[in-house]
Amino acid sequence: QVQLVESGGGLVQPGGSLRLSCAASEAISGFYYMGWYRQVPGSQRELVARITSSGDTDYADFTMGRFTISRGNAENTVVLQMNSLKPDDTADYYCNLQMRAYSFRDVWGQGTQVTVSS
């Protein structure tokens, strides 16, 4: 089973930037969605941004042009660049993969914490 390894969370001041990376443990074939969700305690996990194998992207409205998702330089990686971070962006961020070959079943990373605070 494919595993996802995340990196790049941490503490940043409001207005700062962070870069999250997610790498799949093996090659991904066929059509897929790969992206990031986030969750705060007591709330449902919500989509932040995702990219397809074709390069199409989806963003949550709250990203408002502040976040950019892209494929990383290494194969089977995605990168989420987050700029102009706000305290409301504080959450656990999870990498997600859905592959058509597996009926778009969710594969999740272990999560990485992002804290935006002065």
Image (tube, helix red, strand yellow):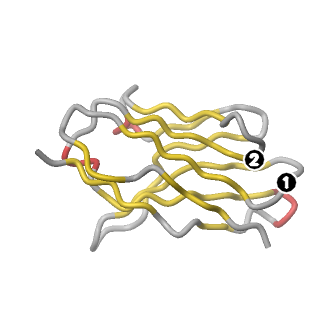
- Judge by depth and name the residue closer to the eye, 97 or 75: 75
Name the image quarter holding the C terminus. top left
Label 2 crowd (10 A; few <14 / some 14-19 / many >=20):
some
Residue type marked 2: Asn
In the rendered view, would you say 111 is above or below 28?
A: below
Q: Quadrant of residue 19?
A: top left
Element carrying mark 2: loop
Name the image quarter holding the N terminus. bottom right
Residue 16 x/y as whole percent: 26, 33
Label 1 crowd (10 A; few <14 / some 14-19 / many >=20):
few
How many numbered marks, from 0 up? Answer: 2
Residue at horizontal 67 percent and vertical 36 percent from the top: 71
Residue at horizontal 57 percent and vertical 40 percent from the top: 79
Residue 39 x/y as whole percent: 37, 63
Give the alpha-carbon distance from disc 1 to disc 2, as whole Å: 6 Å
Tag 1 near tag 2, CB within 8 Å: yes
Q: In the rendered view, does 3 fall on the left or right side of 1?
A: left
- Reading the image, the residue beneath label 1 is 27
Residue at horizontal 88 percent and vertical 51 percent from the top: 29
- Reading the image, the residue beneath label 2 is 76
In the rendered view, would you say 55 is above or below 104?
A: above
